[in-house]
Amino acid sequence: MQIEEGAILSGKVTGLTDFGAFVELEGGKTGMIHISEVASNYVKDIREHLSVGQEVKVKVISISPDGKISLSIKRLTEQPKEQRAARPAKPKSERRSSPPVWNGQKSSAPQAGEKQSFEDMMARFKQVSDEKMTDLKRADSKRGSAGYSRRGAK
């Protein structure tokens, strides 16, 4: 019997390891179900889901060039992406907004649609950066740095 990707087959569990289960398929071939392909929820111990000698229905995920067959039980019960129920989008009023970001002084900010040269943009960036650094230094000195100096000397 020829085994193809996507085929649904029956088999018997012949061995269990910490990382998965080996299944003897029709025709005497053996495939492996990785522990992540046993169930849709997290599987800590595969022995809680499968036992040696158990008959299982599996889906062939892939066949490597050297003949290793990857199997899945989980993918038999999963719905294709198109059939999954799409979550309804939340109204804009219920969506999380991004946190407020300090943008410097708004009065000196360019108006929407106003063209600026590269030099103007760099000057604006430097000004905003200097303002932020001044504010940070001021806040640090108000908190009291408990004798800590950035230069390493006390």
Image: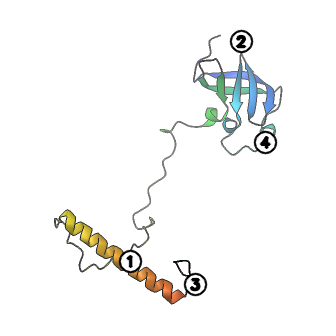
Q: Name the residue under label 1.
A: 132
Q: How far apart are marks 1 and 4 (CA)?
A: 53 Å
Q: Which one is closest to the eye, mark 1 or mark 3? A: 3
Amino acid type at mark 1: Lys
> Image quadrant of residue 94?
bottom left
- Of labels 1 and 4, the one closer to you: 1
- Tell me what residue is drawn at x 56 percent, y 77 percent: 152
Q: Which residue lies furthest to the right in this view?
A: 52
Residue hosting label 4: 45
Q: Can residue 30 be seen in this view?
A: yes
Question: For numbered disc 2, what is the local secondary structure?
Answer: loop
Q: Which amino acid does label 3 sit on?
A: Lys
Which of the two marks, 2 or 1, is nearer to us in this view?
A: 1
Q: What residue type is labelled 4?
A: Asp
Would you call the spot at circle 2 few (<14 residues within 10 Å), some (14-19), or many (20 or more)? few
The Cα–Cα distance between marks 1 and 3, rounded to whole angstroms, is 25 Å
- Residue 48 as seen in the image, left or right of residue 36: right
Taking depth in this image into account, of 153 and 92 the one nearest to the observer is 153
Camera-nearest residue between 21 and 105: 105
Residue 83 percent coordinates (x, y): 50, 39
Residue 27 is marked as 2
Q: Earlier in the sequence, mark 2 or mark 3?
A: 2
Q: If you read the primary sequence from the N terminus, does the residue marked by circle 1 or circle 4 appear first? A: 4
The residue at the point 65 percent across, 22 percent down is 69
- Per the model, the C-alpha gap separating discs 4 and 2 is 29 Å
Which quadrant would the C terminus be assigned to in this image? bottom right
Q: Residue 154 carries which label?
A: 3
Q: Which residue is drawn at 26% across and 72% down?
A: 124
Within-10-Å neighbours for mark 1: few <14, some 14–19, many 20+? some
**Between marks 4 and 3 in the image, the one whose residue lies nearer the viewer:** 3
